[in-house]
Image: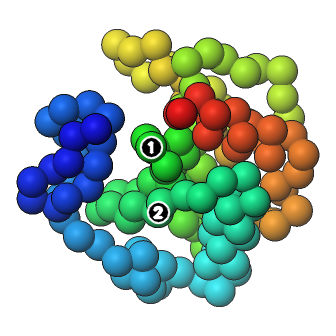
Amino acid sequence: MWTCPLCEREFTATNQAHSCRDRELSEALSSKTPHTIALFDHLIDEYLQITEIKVYPTKSMIALGARINFAYVTQLGKNFIDVVFPFKQVYDDNLCFSKIKQVPGTDQYNHYFRMYFKEDIDDEVRKYMRIAWEKSM
C-alpha cells in the first residue's frame, strides 16, 4: 500500500493519480433533492450489508471502496443516481445495466446502472455489487 503524503489516502499503486482536494460528502449532496439523497443512502446501506466501505467524494464523482475503489456514483440527478461498476470482463446477460463500455486503452469495462427507486437494487444488482467488491480484493 502507498499513502499519499499530502492527503494521507491509501492506494494499492505507488504514486496513484488522484485528487487530494478534500471534499465533504455533505458538500457533494448539498444541492440534491431529498429523493436523490435517499437513493444514495440506500445504495450505501446495501453495500454495508456486503462489507465495510469507504466513501470518497471528489470533484466529479463519489467513489466507493475498501482496499481499492469498486464503484462510482457518477451522477446525482434530480430523481436518480448513476453508478458505474468497473469490471475486467463484460457481463452482458443482465437486466440492470443500461450500458457497458470499454475504457479505451485498458481491459476495463464500465457497467452503468441507473437507480430511480430503492427497489431498483434487487438481487441481480446485489450480485454485481458483490462481484465488484470481491474483484477489488
Which one is in front, 123 or 50?
50
Q: Which residue is located at x 15 percent, y 36 percent?
A: 15
The secondary structure type at the circle numbered 2 is strand
> Label 1, on which residue?
67
Q: Which residue type carries mark 1?
A: Arg
Identify the disc placed on residue 126. none
The secondary structure type at the circle numbered 1 is loop
Whether residue 87 is visible to the viewer of this picture, yes or no, is yes
Whether residue 82 is visible to the viewer of this picture, yes or no, is no
Q: Which residue is located at x 55 percent, y 58 percent?
A: 53
Residue 78, image quadrant: bottom right
Q: Position of residue 1 (x, y in %)?
A: 28, 38
**In the image, is residue 121 above or below residue 28?**
above
Q: Position of residue 34 (x, y in %)?
A: 65, 86
Marks 1 and 2, how far apart at CA = 12 Å
Q: Which residue type carries mark 2?
A: Val
Q: In this view, does 52 lie to the left or right of 103?
A: right
